[in-house]
Image (cartoon, rainbow, N blue to C red):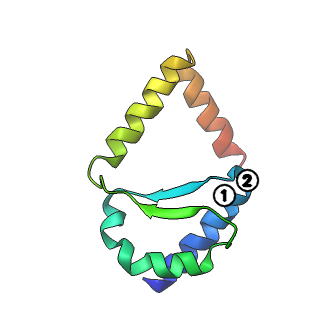
Amino acid sequence: MADFGAALAEIVNKYCAEFIPDVIVIGGSIAKSADVFIPSMEAGLDPRGPEVIVSRRIDEAALIGAAVFWTGMFAKKRSPNDLRANISQQESSL
């Protein structure tokens, strides 16, 4: 799992350079094993980077994230087609 933590840190560092988050939340099923890979992940992260925390709502994390995303979509008066186009555009730039 140390290799996984190091690889995850490498990926997270790339995204943090672009998006500059304040916090990275580890949630979902993987959070159940966080104590195994978080130390090696944190060791590989840029020390100026965001704080890494583990969600306490492991089983509800995906549902809460979807709800926040969905309500934000309506707050900005976007249609699901607008979001699909945005996702496709982002994927093509990777």
Q: Is residue 1 above or below residue 71?
A: below
Q: Are marks 1 and 2 in contact (CB under 8 Å)?
A: yes
The quarter of the displayed image where residue 31 is located: bottom left
Residue 5 placement, left or right of 50: left
Q: Is residue 2 above or below residue 69?
A: below
The reply to whether residue 11 is in sight is yes
Residue 76 in picture, x, y percent from top left: 57, 19
Please, what secondary structure does the residue beneath circle 1 have?
helix
Residue 55 in picture, x, y percent from top left: 37, 57
The quarter of the displayed image where residue 8 is located: bottom right
Q: Identity of the amino acid at label 1?
A: Tyr
The residue at the point 33 percent across, 40 percent down is 63
The residue at the point 55 percent across, 63 percent down is 51
| Circle 1 residues within 10 Å: few <14, some 14–19, many ≥20 | few
Residue 28 placement, left or right of 41: left
The residue at the point 63 percent across, 72 percent down is 10
Residue 18 in picture, x, y percent from top left: 73, 53
Furthest-top residue in this view: 77
The residue carrying mark 1 is 15
- 32 and 91: which one is in front? 32
Q: CA distance from mark 1 to mark 2?
A: 5 Å
The residue carrying mark 2 is 18
Please, what secondary structure does the residue beneath circle 2 have?
helix
Q: Is residue 52 above or below residue 94?
A: below
- 10 and 55: which one is in front? 55
| Circle 2 residues within 10 Å: few <14, some 14–19, many ≥20 | few
